[in-house]
Amino acid sequence: MKRTSTYFAKNGETPERWRVIDAQGQTLGRLARNIAIALQGKDKPVYTPHSLTGDFVVVTNAADMRVTGNKLDQKMYYRHSGYVGNLKTFRLREMLESKPDRVLELAVKGMLPKNHMGRQMLRRLKVYNGPDHPHQAQVAGHPVADGG
């Protein structure tokens, strides 16, 4: 009796596509979830946990995301320099005004694996506040545009 083995994709074996996602009017958490799945490649049949099978993701209009409930005033972001008493806190409202792209990156980062692969996946995420992005050449070679 012949035993069939499970297929594991190797690095560089699966084609890397570029996805463009428009964040205008989309909810932060749901958008971050969809991006994290695309970066990991979990929506592909060749998903392999130990190799990069995900796609590159370009997000436009990050400044036009929306959040629900009282998160604008209640959700806090923390940054610490390592020195005693140097903990900085920021509300979501302040972060969306100053760095809306960073808000989405942090949300996606929390949904990715906390290891070397997760950091490699996060490097494949490109977030822009406006509708324009400098990746037209890459996207033109792989015409896959997602709405979310």
Image (tube, rainbow, N blue to C red):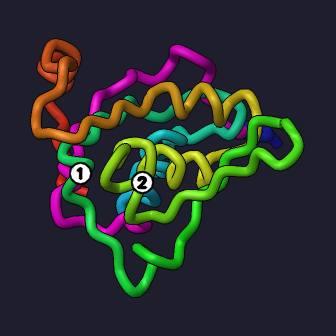
Q: Is residue 24 above or below residue 145?
A: below
Q: Relative to residue 69, is residue 14 depicted above or below? A: above
Q: Quadrant of residue 70?
A: bottom left
Question: Which residue carries the number 1 mark?
Answer: 63
Which residue is rendered at x = 38% and y = 23% of the image? Answer: 16
Q: Looking at the figure, which quarter contains the N terminus?
A: top right
Few, some or many residues within 10 Å of mark 2 (<14, 14–19, 20+): some
Residue lying at 39% horizontally and 67% vertically, measured from the top left: 30
Indicate the position of residue 95 as horizontal and vertical percent values. 42, 54
> Amino acid type of disc 2?
Met
Relative to residue 8, is residue 42 depicted above or below? Answer: below
Q: Which region of the structure is painted magenta?
A: 6-30
Q: Is residue 63 magenta?
A: no
> What residue appears at the point 11 percent right and 30 percent down from the top-left corner?
132
* Residue at the right extreme of this rendering: 84
Name the residue tied to disc 2. 95
Residue 59 position by quadrant: top left
Q: Quadrant of residue 148?
A: bottom left
- First reached walking from the N terminus: tag 1 or tag 2: 1
